[in-house]
Image (cartoon, rainbow, N blue to C red):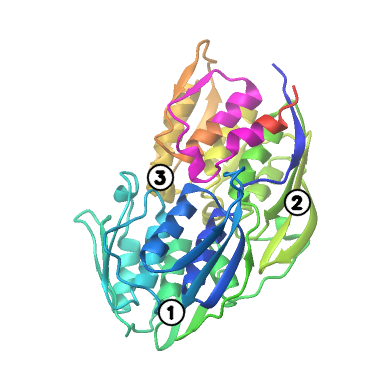
Amino acid sequence: MSHRFEGEILDLPSDKSISHRSALIAALAKGTTHIERFSTGLDNQTTLTVLQELGLTIREYRNLSSPEEPYSIEIHSEGLWSFKQPKKYLQCNNSGSTIRMLAGILSAQPFCTTLVGDASLMKRPMKRIQGPLMQMGAQISLSPNGTAPVQVCGTKNLIPSEFNLPIASAQVKSAIIFAALHAEGETRIQEPLQTRNHTELMLGLIQNQINQNDQNDSPIEPPIISIQGPFQIEAKPFKIPADPSAACFLVALGLLATQAHIAIRNVCLNQTRTGFLKVVKRGGANLTFENKRIESGEQVGDIIISNQKIASPLRLEDPTEVANVIDEIPMLSVLSAFSTGSFFVTNAKELRAKECDRISALVQNLQAMGFICNEWPEGFEVIKRDREPKTSVAINTFHDHRIAMAFEIIKVAKSELIDLSETASIPVSFPNFFNVIKKLKVA
């Protein structure tokens, strides 16, 4: 069955990563910060809730008739040490960004706090933040398994330090940066691979420049990040662009559909976030970009998909590239499998520490759809499809929003017989996902 999808997307969810960071930076900034287009995703709402429980004043300006739309907020703070000890455990729900980055801020506050989450978050690794923050002088206690609850007993006398991080993690890097803002002296951070750099850009620790050919550039070498503390931030406005990780699903929809002309407007095109576009272009898709510019320190522009396809199987091997597309691998793998019958990824052990073990989840579900797969500790491959199910296939999402959306895209673009185990996880990052797909579908 053929399907045609066309339209202009102006209401893609606001960038999840930048929304988290804008709120956390506003909580540390002296004055009132105005944030335009804050995300309504459940993870980002969690960050706002815990900041309120820490004593911050937040005003929201929502469109009550369209509760899924991004909206404006104002956060008022007196600066780096404006937090109050909460009266109860801080519930971080499913948000790894909230629990890890907030731990960096709390490491500098002169009280103890306990951070918890839902069943999924309580299984995710937290030793990666414990070591660096304890090196700076905070006391961090974890469960015997190295997971949450995370108890943070902070100090106003954090020690500036030098870090050569053993893993590539933007959350760990950001946690250290937020702690280092409070420390007397210079803290230096070197990553093994370049990860998303929103925190550094938003704080002015590095500068962004438009490169018209950045989709074809070689992998970025991670710079040494230097923070001279105490670093008092002054409040300034932020405008949040559309989330490229959400755009990935619509790009895949356009590449899978029989016919498509989709314009995705005002997307964050930060070079540390657009690796998936390089990957699909390498597979043969000739995407175009329009209206590129800098807004609030970030590259922003439009992505145009018009009757494009990928012809070659997608392969992900370079560690830097894999780190750059780690959130998009669920969609990329499914896209490649259903377009070419094949996919390959390695150096992706981090996939096992996401909302679920995404390697295992993808392999299990692709096998259920008739694909032959091989799995190993750091990746997996799809070899070919040797059967097409004649009846509906039960897809286990493992309550992971990206697994759910990846297979839903296959369902609507290819008319595959799929029955998702749940869809309640999708609003974590893409509250209006089904409405956007519905608006694009023409026939």
The magenta span reads: 408-437
Which residue position holds label 3?
355
Residue 63, horizontal then vertical, whole percent: 61, 49
Q: Nearer the viewer, mark 1 or mark 3?
A: 1
Secondary element at image label 3? loop
* Location of the N terminus (image quadrant): top right
Question: Which of the pair 380/88 is nearer the observer?
Answer: 88
Membership of 394 in magenta stretch: no
Q: Are marks 2 and 1 in contact (CB under 8 Å)?
A: no
Q: Residues within 10 Å of mark 1 (few under 14, many from 20)?
A: many
Question: Which of the pair 92/180 is nearer the observer?
Answer: 92
What residue do we see at 38% from left, 70% from top? 104
Membership of 409 in magenta stretch: yes
Q: Earlier in the sequence, mark 2 or mark 1?
A: 1
Which residue position holds label 1?
80
* Location of the C terminus (image quadrant): top right
Which residue position holds label 2?
302
What residue do we see at 71% from left, 59% from top? 300
Residue 223: image quadrant is bottom right
| Amino acid type, mark 2 | Asp
Residue 310, visible in the rendered structure: no
Q: Distance between the residues labelled 2 and 3?
A: 29 Å
With respect to residue 390, does 372 lie above or below? below
Residue 416, horizontal then vertical, whole percent: 58, 20
Q: How far apart are marks 2 and 1 (CA)?
A: 36 Å
